Amino acid sequence: MVKKRPGPSAVRPAGYSFLIQQFDLQVTTHWHVSEVGGSKHQKNIAADGHIREVFPHSYWPGDERLDHFEFALKYDGMNLEVLSGIFSQVDTDELTSWITAKPQGQYTRRIWYLYEWMTGEQLPIDNLTQGNYIDLLNKDKYYTTQGKMIQRQRIRDNMLGPSSFCPLVRKTETLLKFERSQLSQRCRHILADYRPEFLRRAISYLYTKEAKSSFAIEHITPNASRTERFASLLQVAEKDDFISKDALVDLQNRIVDPRYANKDYRHNQNYVGETVAWQRERIHYISPQPQNLNDLMEGLILSHQKMDPSQVHPVVHAAVIAFGLVFMHPFDDGNGRIHRFLIHNILARRGFTPEGLIFPISAAMLNDLERYNAPLESFSKPLMQRIDYTLDEDGQMTVHHQTALYYRYPDMTPMAEALFSFIQATIEKELVEELNFLENYDATKQAMQEIVDMPDQRIDFFIRFCLQNNGIISPKKRNSHFSELTDDEIEKMQAAIQKAYH
């Protein structure tokens, strides 16, 4: 039932806010909240980028529910989750009448197409036979693909995915600024300052560092052989497309302990939590229900296939797929490492990463876990408020209602912004520091070998022990490992290390 219209001085919700209220939807708060009332236009932008905008009285769309479709698309942008919730309730006769009253209208055509796209049901409306094709998403405001021409509504579907999984990424000023910074080119300029033979050796070290950092984010300390296996796997990330069901299952099998390898997507309800007391868990995140997982993952893979040949920025592409996968949590173990692996896979295959190189992105994430967790929590915290679940004494979870819609149409803007920021930190800090460290290491080894002609491994030990002890070797380490060296040799070798690293 439509609520009684307030007086002219009242500020009242409009657009999606009005629709959410009228249809009693339990959805994630939209990034743009509109209200109508007062005599002047006001716009407030919060620290998280969310906007509250108040429009003058003259903007009021009308008291009927569907009057607010056009206002929502025009001023609030696209929200597929809200629209899907409305389409599951709206009377089709009411919707058909609304569309046929203005079938050529650009917002009408978008709503018409989205209803049939989401529900799979065709409304009793004749195909349009004239008029220009219009973009479903405004390409000045959203990242889009080239698009598929839909003759029925004369729409160009340029979204990032199919109806089973279709994320949105807004072209915020933050993302546009990152694009203008041309990080890929800046990386190539940095590499040009180093000798090719040095880079070849340095890159081997970077692969190992990335492998260790990816494990460390999950508080795992792997042995040397496990680290080396993951580093070797990272080296093929630039060649093969790992985003298909078979490839992802194989990837999971190669990453985890063989005893926990999955032959398919998981069949259980999993979650991310921590034990805070005896038989008490604090739940941080709940994954999609297993019965919905195949459909969602198929959508994720189709989304990748839509973006792969397109002009969607590689970092946006990588963020959508890698974070999308970690939200799906399709396996019992290894999801986080697969998520970070796919970032490298997409950036390399799309040509963003220089050939043969790997960005130590996990190292940058490890150094700022709060910033890494922020986009994850921007999705998980609202989600957790909406899911009704129980946990038995064996830790088995039961979710008591359908949740697929919560994962189907995410706003991935925060994830794209976060990934860009980590890549920037990687290129400008992590990569430069690592290359400079290794260059100093080479110079130090050469200087030390001019003092004492020692085997490489023993020089490596000497440098490591000194760096662990403020540039000098401890008496204990000297006696146990380098008793054959004279005081003069020790002092000169320590001086070479201190010159390079202090």
Image (cartoon, helix red, strand yellow):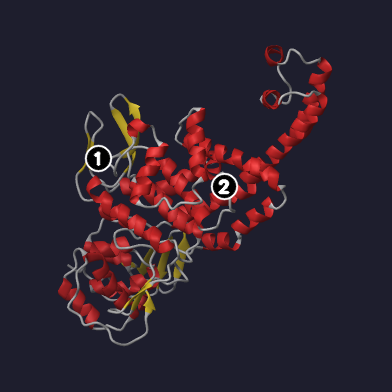
Query: Could you say where residue 334 lies in the image, as x and y percent from the top left?
Result: 39, 39
Q: Which of 31 and 171 is in front in this view?
A: 171
Query: Could you say where residue 65 lies in the image, as x and y percent from the top left?
Result: 24, 71
What is the spatial separation of the Cα atoms under label 2 and label 1, in whole angstroms? 34 Å
Q: Looking at the image, is mark 2 or mark 1 earlier in the sequence?
A: 1
Secondary structure at numbered mark 1 = loop
Q: In this image, 128 relative to 258: left or right?
A: left
Residue pictured at 47% horizontal, 31% vertical = 226
Labelled disc at residue 324: none
Disc 2 + disc 1, Cβ < 8 Å: no
Query: Outermost residue toward the bottom?
Result: 130
Question: Residue under circle 1?
Answer: 268
Disc 1 marks a residue whose amino acid type is Asn
Image quarter hosting the C terminus: top right
Query: Could you say where residue 103 lies in the image, as x and y percent from the top left?
Result: 27, 82
Answer above or below: position of 156 versus 479: below
Task: Residue 87: tell me if it is visible.
Answer: yes
Secondary structure at numbered mark 2 = loop
Labelled disc at residue 359: 2
